[in-house]
Image (spheres, rainbow, N blue to C red):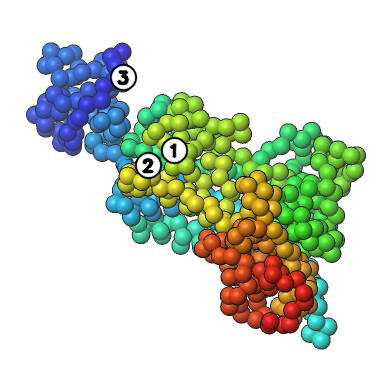
Amino acid sequence: MAPELPVIVSQLPSTNDASAWTNARRLAYIRISGLNGSVTGTHSISDPGDRAPGPGLFARHYRMSLRRFFVNDTVLDVNGTAFDLAVIGSGGAAMAAAIAARQADKTVVLVEQATLGGTCVNVGCVPSKTLLAAAGARHGALVNPFPGAPTSAGGVDFAVLVGQKDELVGRLRQAKYADVADAYGFEVRPGRARFTDENTLTVDGQPLPARAYLVATGAEPAHPALPGLDEIDWLTSTTAMEQTELPESLVVIGGGYVGMEQAQLFAHLGARVTLIGRLAPAAEPEVADALRAVFADDRITVIEDRAVGVETEGDEVVVVTRSGQRARGARVLVATGRSPRTAALDLDAAGVKTDDRGFVVVDAQQATSNPRIYAAGDVSGAPQYVYVAAALGRVAALNATGAAGPRPATVDYTGMPGVVFTRPQLGTAGLTEAQALAAGHRYECRVLGLSDVPRALANRDTRGVVKLVADADTGRLLGVHAAADAAGEITLAATYAIKAGMTVDEIADAWAPYLTMAESLRIAAGLFRNEMPTSCCA
């Protein structure tokens, strides 16, 4: 087979006129595969004596015979055109990339093999938070701290809640994804994407030509190698939110953010819940302790041990831990992490390296080991927040298309916030105490109990803490961590303060509206210079 050579070609004729095709023959190397059984392989047709089919046959059959063209190493379609960027996926990273590319006047196409919108809107952030809101409303009615305004809560129609969730998801998918794609003028093409070599992406077997590619396929619930697990009908966070009946009891394996949210969601709806795993493993110790107390109040049994096996006894499932403890429930929900969606892409064929967990290896510009292929979002091993995915998608698009200019775009993670939507919320921004130490800071910390926060007192719920980490030499705020009602709003303010380089003295002297949870930032900052009790507003 003759080698494929990069050449410059003109726009291919869209006409059946033989003379136009005669001219095109002088300009291109064309791969012809099985044209009427007469020709196979790659043939130069610049020589009039070539045995390639004549122009009339080209005109009649070019759509089935011309597989790809090369323009400066760029694969072209049969009309001689290529997208500036082809994105695999349609979630947060993919949409942000497409928008950034279109704003830079680049052509872009998204490829989606499943449902438009990716994880967040379909099976992640949106559905879980609306169900958590419903569960929180019911639980709030049951634990109402105001006897003069009594409330109560009855049983749960889980199918109705799931239907309400599905309506919201469908509405947001249309408004925030389909309508946005139409507004910016980019196509979302259905189909299964796969790389066949370092330069070629196919969709359902057909080449999709582009000057650069972006892998933004996200991640999915991990499937742990737990003996006995595959013998039962186990749930993930995705399938749990698709059920139509509330389980009477549930064992949650995994104490991270997904496990904590799902455990409290089902407990607040009335299920008996046991959680196995270290609770809030990435949180500051003081914050994790506050959540432990809350889970105890919620009658969620927490076994901080590792699951080693799953058994069945009658109608119940039993999860066995390393220390021999046994947790029983009607259903088991596994939340032990997330795995990248890369199996179907054939990244090896594209020369794209992955790490030992399968996540795509990228540099600070989101470039992979193949200079034409970028990756962004959860699939790249980044912090699994949709706003991080969006930021990385934008960076990847700017760098992949050259729109970033001479200075490559990167993401600054300073002050990055995170929220676990338990009740109370777990919020974080910036460095933990351990991270500050690892970064070489000489640091100080202060911890404020919510019993010293007027808003918590007014709410009659003082469970929780706010912890600040500051540089001991400069006083600059490094991190804020909270278990509190509206901790997400607290950490948003903290992110701004950290990004601005504010000191704890500046925060203590800044305006803070009274009787807000965010006021806890000012109160906690004041502890760095005075740990004596304070008056309400002083």
The amino acid marked with disc number 1 is Ala
- Residue 157 appears anywhere in the view: no
The answer to whether residue 500 is left or right of residue 422 is: left
Of the image marks 1 and 3, the number of the one nearer the N terminus = 3
- Residue 103 appears anywhere in the view: yes
Helix, strand or loop at label 2? It is helix
Marks 2/1 in contact by CB < 8 Å: the verdict is: yes
Identified at 61% across, 34% down, the residue is 357
The answer to whether residue 442 is left or right of residue 55 is: right
Spatial distance from mark 1 to mark 3, Cα to Cα?
A: 36 Å
Label placed on residue 34: 3
Compare residues 280 and 325 and report the one nearer the observer.
Answer: 280
Identified at 31% across, 19% down, the residue is 34
Identified at 74% across, 52% down, the residue is 280
The answer to whether residue 397 is left or right of residue 391 is: left
Label placed on residue 367: 1
- For the N terminus, the image quarter is top left
Helix, strand or loop at label 1? It is loop
Q: Quadrant of residue 82?
A: top left
Spatial distance from mark 2 to mark 1, Cα to Cα?
A: 8 Å
**For mark 2, what is the residue?**
400
Of the image marks 3 and 2, the number of the one nearer the N terminus = 3
Compare residues 20 and 151 and report the one nearer the observer.
Answer: 151
Q: Quadrant of residue 179?
A: bottom left
The answer to whether residue 404 is left or right of residue 178 is: left
Compare residues 502 and 160 and report the one nearer the observer.
Answer: 502
Estimate the x, y position of residue 109 in percent, counting from the top left: 37, 45
